[in-house]
Image (cartoon, coloured by chain):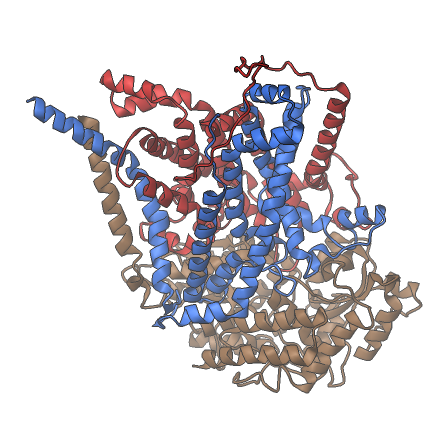
Chain colours: A blue, B red, C brown
């Protein structure tokens, strides 16, 4: 009798987590696993959603990986991430530190709201706004430049500057969001650590390196991961602002995915892009977490 | 996710003899007034600069089409009470309907993903089971794929079950959110196991523990989640475009994009639409702001 | 105990749903290709019509609410005209046609791609073939036909572009507004006089050039230059672009464009789109279609401007060719195809045509309407007359037109940015010929 009761309890304990996870599993399956499997399948076909398709084996993979379009899209996307992530992170950290240091409580909420405002706008709206600002002829950006005595730039119309310009837009749009996460982390660090260090004679930089940085690690890694993944998924900004131009200088991987599938009806090719991007993002994010995560404990 | 263990040594206050001292009380160190004022000014200035483009949009929404395109660029509208663009949005373009739709879809998404995430986070935090970490990684992997890549298979599935052009269909990819599971798990792991254990020993059912004990303790995280999730669903781009078959089901983003045309953009309407689309989120943020900082803080600490 | 069973049931349900989801979306179901799923072939007494052209939203409202002729003859048919946002209409169309039952009955699109390339549109029935051949503007007819058969009913006779110029600025530099440039050489001279430069920077375009945005649009806007110098995009039998896209005429035409930007510095790649800059007075001249008039009246009511026909190039008048030919097509797999054709029959009459043209400010498609004061009183009437006189130019309706015209746009964009003309065009030909071959297969 006791035995049976124990067995039921054990079963209950074992089954519970799975039961709790069942809706999650369901949605991960539907929203993710099935589409990915579908993509893998069609990547081996010259696939069209409106006409008959033919099996082509690895031809799509070979074509894509050797094509200059792929090189271009991949390069643009990576470059974008390399600019956006470190700068965005650094600025967010600086901002969070600044707000954290601010002892005057009265303006604090308003200031936080000001920086958070850009997060609220959709990326399409962000793109439209900055198209105006970056207009080389009458936009505010160049007006500012000339006011400072610097030459006007091409911004979104220049093949060299378009990615950095998009990076500025992205950083602007996400700064407040990341800053708040880091700010929360900063607020949670017990002041006693700083007191102790100060008494020991540590300077600001030393305190930052030995106390803040390690204790902020979780949030930093979180922001780092999310920002990287978001950057590599670049789509809406160039889609709305430059349509991939000029001369494809701002065409990203996801834009290629969209174009190949929806504009040219080449779903197999699009699927290859999807899979390459997915694997790349996984590898990069995994590596970052491995390298940057630290477990912090007290001495 | 297992991470490498790097031990960092934190300073502990010690007195002359080397024995550890009690940590000093909080806030004993007073920063210089001057620095504070400088800091405030710098932050305020930066804030204004940051929000400036949006102010520009707001002011432009009060301009007529020819005003917007005038060169040299006009900062302020000629008529501060020119609400024509907004009137046009609601009268000619059915924007009121779009807003309602966006609200409904966002609400469905928030509620659904919150409940599912709570269940899942609870499972990850307080239960042991095989494949726990690999499952978690699998869930996180979903975040890494751009939505545009998965759109067609998801759409085809939806079409087969006849959910196209329905609210449920519109909310479909948002019924579950990776970020929710991640955030809530982080948060829940900060709750001491003893609470749950005690309740279990008392014979409480799992769902009861979740509802009565865990939920109140993770309230700040829930607030954070609601804001972030609302932002996601409110501004989502490609999916509603495909799923809404007629105008009565369009969401705000679809409506906004509608004004960016083939040959030229209707800037006045775009600006007005942007302003309107930002208002609900701003209100939500302002209301839940204090939870945001507190909530995010505790989610990351332990 | 109860919740445990509930949870177990939930898990089972989840698994089942996933399984059904699996079979439902299995690629096999779609491998037959055509949009229709068998068994959904019931016309449910309604017509779904998709309009993706943001410029013609008033048309949608009219067709749904004010088009009474069809309502009277078919009281049981509920006509629903849906506005599709232009920017992503290809995605919406792809999704709609892929799913079968979400596909529209009637849709507006590019005939060459949807009828030719993808094969989702049906040819018009005999009575309409006859009616349209007899009554619609012949210059643009080939754009809506495949192999001589009508597939789409034209929406507006977009006769291509005309020369818009800023009268005030003409006077400012001493040019006579009544004597617009007649040749491309004159165009260059005028542009030179009209351009305002600040050191090396152009602050006012003598001539506005379309250099960014949708690539097919860029290709479209370069056609007048190409045709004026005797070039074409590809052979009329759509077999090859070699010798055409990279042939002498095209090279000369694109070099002229490139020179305007790079050498003569009469056109800037930075001021903004031709439409915006013309409205702002930052461009003195631009090529644009007839609808631009309506746009200018709303966005720049104080602007003093005039319209003239294209100048002539060394090879003569650049005849009109459109890469965008928007027509109403019927979904071949629609269960309501018959009703759809009846609707199109009802719409294609001179009165409705004139109504819509007046509503949107574009040119009607029925030849008889060209006598109407609405047309003859237009500012661009002289230009319109000229275009009608000259007749149509070559029609580029290769099946894979989307991709081909995008590649051409890329080449033009690169050239405007300064790339070597011949080389760029040769490279483009290398990419386009396989696409042409594929389309012919």
Q: Quadrant of the C terminus of chain B?
A: top left
Can you give x and y, in whole percent of width and height, for residue C55 in the image? 61, 57
Question: In the figure, A170 relative to A15: above or below?
Answer: below
User: Position of C280 compared to C1: left or right?
Assistant: right
- The one nearer the camera, C202 or B77, is C202
Q: Quadrant of the N terminus of chain B?
A: top left
Can you give x and y, in whole percent of width and height, for residue C158 in the image? 63, 69
Can you give x and y, in whole percent of width and height, for residue C48 in the image? 43, 56
**Can I make out residue C197 in this image?**
yes
Identify the residue shown where x is 63% and y is 57%: A242
Query: Which quarter of the figure has residue A194?
Result: top right
Identify the residue shown where x is 63% and y is 44%: A87
Question: In the figure, B301 relative to B275: above or below?
Answer: above
Q: How many marks?
A: 0
Identify the residue shown where x is 66% and y is 69%: C413
Q: Residue furthest right?
A: C174
**Can I make out residue A125 in this image?**
no
Q: Residue furthest left?
A: A1
Question: In the figure, B76 relative to C364: above or below?
Answer: above
Can you give x and y, in whole percent of width and height, for residue A173 in the image? 61, 42
Query: Which quarter of the figure has residue A18?
Result: top left
- The one nearer the camera, B65 or B76, is B76
């Amino acid at each position: 009798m006791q035995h049976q009761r124990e067995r039921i309890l054990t079963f209950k304990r074992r089954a519970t987590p799975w039961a709790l996870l069942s809706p999650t599993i369901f949605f991960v399956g539907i929203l993710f696993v099935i589409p990915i499997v579908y993509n893998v399948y069609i990547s081996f076909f010259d696939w069209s959603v409106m006409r008959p398709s033919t099996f082509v084996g690895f031809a799509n993979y070979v074509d894509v990986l050797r094509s200059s379009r792929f090189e271009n899209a991949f390069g643009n996307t990576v470059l974008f991430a390399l600019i956006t992530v470190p700068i965005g992170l650094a600025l967010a950290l600086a901002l969070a530190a600044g707000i954290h240091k601010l002892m005057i409580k009265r303006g604090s909420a308003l200031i936080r709201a000001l920086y958070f405002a850009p997060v609220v706008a959709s990326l399409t709206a962000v793109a439209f706004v900055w198209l105006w600002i970056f207009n080389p002829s009458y936009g505010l950006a160049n007006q500012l430049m000339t006011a400072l005595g610097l030459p006007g730039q091409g911004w979104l119309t220049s093949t060299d500057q378009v990615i950095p310009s998009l990076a500025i837009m992205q950083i602007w749009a996400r700064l407040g969001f990341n800053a708040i996460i880091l700010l929360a982390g900063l607020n949670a660090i017990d002041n006693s650590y700083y007191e102790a260090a100060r008494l020991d004679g540590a300077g600001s930089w030393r305190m930052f390196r030995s106390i803040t940085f390690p204790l902020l690690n979780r949030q930093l890694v979180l922001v780092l991961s999310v920002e990287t993944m978001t950057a590599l998924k670049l789509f809406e900004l160039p889609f709305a602002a430059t349509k991939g131009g000029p001369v494809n200088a701002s065409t990203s991987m996801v834009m290629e995915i969209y174009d190949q599938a929806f504009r040219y009806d080449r779903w197999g090719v699009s699927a290859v892009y999807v899979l390459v991007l997915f694997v790349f993002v996984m590898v990069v994010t995994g590596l970052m977490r491995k390298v940057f995560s630290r477990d912090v404990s007290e001495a | 996710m297992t991470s490498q263990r790097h031990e960092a040594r934190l300073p502990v206050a010690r007195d002359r003899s080397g024995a550890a001292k009690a940590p000093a009380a909080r806030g004993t160190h007073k920063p210089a007034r001057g620095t504070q004022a400088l800091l405030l000014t710098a932050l305020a200035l930066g804030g204004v600069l940051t929000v400036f483009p949006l102010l520009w949009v707001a002011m432009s929404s009060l301009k007529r089409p020819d005003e917007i395109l005038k060169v040299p660029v006009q900062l302020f509208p000629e008529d501060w009470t020119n609400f024509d663009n907004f009137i046009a949005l609601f009268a000619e373009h059915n924007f009121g309907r779009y807003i309602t739709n966006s609200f409904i879809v966002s609400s469905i998404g928030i509620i659904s993903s919150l409940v599912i995430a709570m269940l899942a986070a609870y499972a990850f935090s307080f239960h042991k089971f095989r494949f726990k970490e690999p499952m978690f990684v699998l869930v996180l992997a979903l975040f890494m794929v751009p939505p545009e890549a998965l759109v067609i298979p998801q759409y085809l599935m939806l079409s087969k079950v006849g959910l196209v052009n329905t609210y449920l269909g519109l909310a479909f990819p948002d019924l579950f959110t990776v970020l929710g599971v991640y955030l809530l798990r982080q948060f829940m792991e900060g709750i001491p196991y003893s609470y749950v254990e005690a309740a279990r020993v008392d014979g409480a059912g799992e769902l009861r523990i979740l509802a009565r004990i865990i939920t109140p303790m993770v309230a700040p995280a829930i607030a954070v989640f609601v804001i972030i999730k609302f932002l996601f669903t409110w501004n989502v781009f490609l999916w509603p475009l495909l799923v809404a078959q007629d105008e009565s089901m369009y969401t705000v983003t679809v409506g906004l994009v509608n004004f960016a045309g083939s040959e030229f953009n209707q800037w006045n309407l775009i600006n007005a639409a942007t302003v309107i689309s930002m208002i609900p989120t701003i209100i939500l943020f302002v209301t839940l702001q204090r939870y945001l900082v507190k909530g995010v803080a505790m989610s990351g600490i332990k | 105990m109860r919740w445990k069973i509930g949870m177990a049931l939930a898990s089972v349900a989840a698994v089942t749903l996933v399984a059904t989801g699996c079979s439902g979306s299995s690629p096999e179901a779609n491998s037959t290709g055509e949009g229709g799923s068998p068994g959904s072939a019931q016309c449910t007494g309604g017509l779904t019509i998709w309009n993706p052209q943001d410029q013609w939203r008033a048309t949608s409202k009219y067709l749904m609410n004010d088009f009474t002729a069809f309502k009277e003859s078919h009281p049981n048919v509920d006509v629903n005209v849906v506005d599709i946002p232009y920017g992503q209409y290809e995605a919406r169309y792809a999704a709609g046609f892929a799913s079968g039952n979400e596909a529209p009955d009637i849709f507006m699109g590019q005939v060459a791609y949807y009828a030719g390339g993808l094969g989702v549109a049906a040819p018009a029935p005999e009575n309409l073939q006859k009616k349209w051949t007899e009554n619609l503007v012949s210059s643009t007819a080939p754009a809506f036909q495949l192999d001589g058969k009508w597939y789409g009913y034209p929406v507006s006779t977009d006769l291509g572009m005309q020369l818009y110029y800023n009268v005030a600025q003409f006077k400012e530099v001493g040019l006579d507004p009544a004597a617009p440039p007649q040749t491309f050489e004159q165009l260059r001279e005028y542009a030179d006089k009209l351009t305002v430069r600040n050191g090396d920077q152009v602050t006012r375009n003598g001539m506005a050039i379309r250099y960014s945005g949708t690539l097919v649009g860029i290709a479209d806007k370069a056609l007048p230059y190409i045709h004026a110098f005797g070039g074409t995009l590809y052979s009329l039998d759509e077999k090859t672009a070699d010798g055409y896209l990279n042939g002498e005429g095209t090279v000369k035409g694109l070099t002229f464009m490139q020179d305007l930007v790079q050498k003569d510095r009469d056109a800037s790649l930075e001021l903004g789109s031709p439409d915006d800059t013309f409205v702002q007075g930052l461009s003195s001249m631009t090529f644009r279609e007839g609808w631009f008039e309506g746009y200018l009246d709303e966005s720049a009511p104080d602007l003093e401007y005039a319209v003239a026909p294209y100048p002539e190039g060394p090879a003569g008048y650049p005849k009109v060719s459109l890469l965008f030919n928007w027509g109403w097509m019927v979904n071949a797999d629609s269960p309501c195809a018959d009703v759809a054709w009846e609707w199109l029959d009802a719409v294609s009459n001179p009165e409705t045509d004139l109504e819509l043209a007046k509503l949107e400010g574009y040119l009607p498609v029925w030849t008889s309407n060209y006598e109407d004061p609405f047309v003859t009183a237009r500012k661009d009437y002289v230009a319109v007359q000229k275009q009608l006189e000259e007749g149509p130019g070559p029609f580029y309706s290769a099946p894979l037109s989307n991709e081909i015209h995008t590649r051409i746009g890329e080449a033009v964009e690169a050239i405007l940015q300064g790339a070597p003309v011949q080389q760029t065009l040769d490279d483009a030909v290398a990419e386009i010929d396989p696409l042409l071959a594929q389309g012919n297969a």
